[in-house]
Image (tube, grey):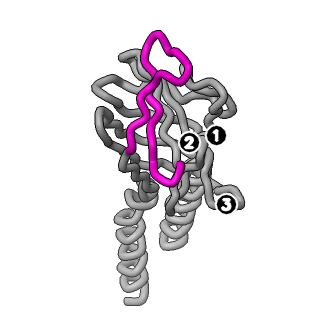
Amino acid sequence: MRSILIAALSILLAGAGNHASASLLWHWNYNGTGVNASGTFTTDVSPDANGFYQIIGIIGTANGGTITGLQPTGTAIPGNSGFAVDNLVRPTGPQLTSHGFGFAVSNGEFHNPFYAGDYLDYIATPPYVDGAGAEPTIRFTASPVPEPDALTLLPLGICALLACRALGRQTRR
């Protein structure tokens, strides 16, 4: 029985590790004059040589609208041609590159937060005339979320270890 519990615990922990390797989840937010945005990113699990993680998904809100999609890497948001996004983020400062990330919002806006000595957000609104967007200074933060599967499994693992210990005591008597 003890070996069965140990095997089950090993499988659970291995499964958590395999799931975690797929992607990382981050909480992010920023605000400034005329802009307020927040949500979560999904990034690749491994950083590049400069410590940046590739953003592969985004959800959240910006200026009262729902974020509807991530701007494809290597393309510019409408109204900001010539400034392609790289969709990179890192846990230490500066957290964004000079290209930043881009996203579309249900209210018709497109946003491109980036770093240029300060954090800025290029905001494009219809009719998306190049260079006509607002570009307020923002306060930007992003941080990886602790792996939920590992936190969920921790109490289960402790219970399994205690059960193994109790079974070991019963078999010795």
Q: CA distance from mark 2 to mark 1?
A: 6 Å
* In front of the other: 167 or 22: 22
Q: Position of residue 30 (x, y in %)?
A: 36, 44
Quarter location, residue 74: top right
Amino acid type of disc 2?
Answer: Gly
The crowd level at tag 2 (other Cα within 10 Å; few <14, some 14-19, many 20+) is many
Type of amino acid at the residue the image marks with label 1: Asp
Assess disc 3: are there few (<14), some (14-19) or many (≥20) residues with their C-alpha within 10 Å of its C-alpha.
few
Q: Nearer the viewer, residue 28 or 44?
A: 28
| Secondary structure state at the residue bearing disc 3 | loop
Q: Which residue is located at x 50 percent, y 15 percent? A: 128
User: Is residue 119 rendered magenta in the image?
Assistant: yes
Cα–Cα gap, marks 3 and 1? 13 Å
First in sequence, mark 3 or 2: give its number. Answer: 3
Label 1 packing within 10 angstroms: few (<14), some (14-19), many (20+)? many
Q: Residue at x 52, y 15 (%)?
A: 129
The numbered disc on residue 54 is none
Please tell me whether mark 1 sits on a helix, a strand or a loop: loop
Task: Please give the name of the residue rendered at 48% of the width and 21% of the height, measured from the top-left corner.
Answer: 132
Q: Is residue 71 visible?
A: yes
Q: CA distance from mark 3 to mark 2?
A: 15 Å
Give the vertical position of 98 relative to 134 (above or below).
Answer: below
The magenta region covers 116-137
Magenta stretch encompasses residue 96: no
Residues marked 3 and 2 touching at CB (< 8 Å) = no
Looking at the image, the residue that sits furthest to the front is 131
Residue located beneath label 3 in the image: 50
Tell me residue 60's x, y (percent). Answer: 38, 33
- Residue at numbered disc 2: 100
Q: How many marks?
A: 3
Which residue in the protein does label 1 denote? Answer: 86
- The spot of residue 166 in percent (x, y) is 35, 79
